[in-house]
Amino acid sequence: MSNIPLKDLLTNIRNCDVCAPHLPLGANPVIQVSSAAKILIIGQAPGTRVHASGIPWNDPSGNTLREWLNISNDVFYDDTQLAIMPMGLCYPGKGKSGDLPPRKECAPQWHDQVLEHLPDVKLTLLIGQYAQKAYLKDGFKTLTERVMHASDAPPPFFPLPHPSPRNRIWLKKNPWFENTVLPELRKRVHEALYD
């Protein structure tokens, strides 16, 4: 277990400005963690709406994610149930086809320290390619292959595509996601929270 209490670690994280010179909107780390959490969500990085509100997944992508998980806002935002720690804790800026990748300094700086405070996590959702590449060494070459084999990922991991409205085309091209992956996901979420 970490030598630093979680409360102090979260204060350090929320005051972090390591990447501030590279962030168009400045530093505003967004994280939700309690040592009692049963599910951990590791996504990419906050968008502009989440940056402004400071509330993780408080946007259309979050609405889709909660629908995928089949859980209410109350459960989603209960830090004793769900911890939320993106690969980049601050909005990285806009790129040519969406937001820029998460800043590379963030995860190495904070993830291991936070993970030490999450002893009860039974399910870790890896949303998008950045989280999956950081945490899974499975040999799959694409996100699609990885998500297609989500139920075979080593526990506690479960890979997912990003629930962004920009991914509607991917979802239409891959109907198996809704037919096979979502039922398994919902089953595992229910088991992690209630069994």
Image (cartoon, helix red, strand yellow):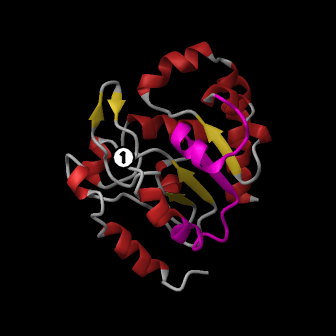
Relative image position of residue 101 (x, y in whole percent) = 40, 40
Say few, some or many: other residues with alpha carbon within 10 Å of mark 1 (under 14 / 14 to 19 / 20 or more): many
Above or below for 175 versus 195: above
Indicate whether 105 appears above or below 8. Answer: above
| SS assignment at label 1 | loop
Residue in view at x 53 percent, y 55 percent: 75
Q: Tell me the quarter of the picture where residue 176 sits.
A: top right
Q: Is residue 150 left or right of residue 63?
A: right
Residue 164 counted in the magenta span: no
In x, y percent, where is residue 1? Answer: 61, 81
Q: Is residue 74 left or right of residue 174?
A: left
- Tally of numbered tags: 1
Residue 128 visible? The answer is: no
Is residue 160 visible in the rendered structure shown here? yes
Q: What residue is shown at x 27% (from left), y 52% (from top)?
A: 53
Residue furthest out toward the bottom: 3
Highlighted range, magenta: 112-141
Rendered position, 100 above or below 189:
above
Instruction: Tell me the residue at 75%/33% (across/down).
Output: 149
Q: Amino acid at mark 1?
A: Pro
**x and y, in percent, of residue 171 in the image:** 56, 20
Q: Is residue 138 magenta?
A: yes
Q: Closer to the camera, 125 or 115?
A: 115
Q: Is residue 100 left or right of residue 22?
A: right
- Quarter of the image for residue 183 reads top right
User: Residue at coordinates 46% horizontally, 65% vertically from top-left?
Assistant: 110
- The extreme top residue here reads 173
Q: Where, quadrant-wise, is the C terminus in this rendering? A: bottom right
Residue at the disc numbered 1: 46
Residue 44's x, y, as percent?
45, 44
Q: In terms of depth relative to the viewer, which is nearer, 89 or 38?
A: 89
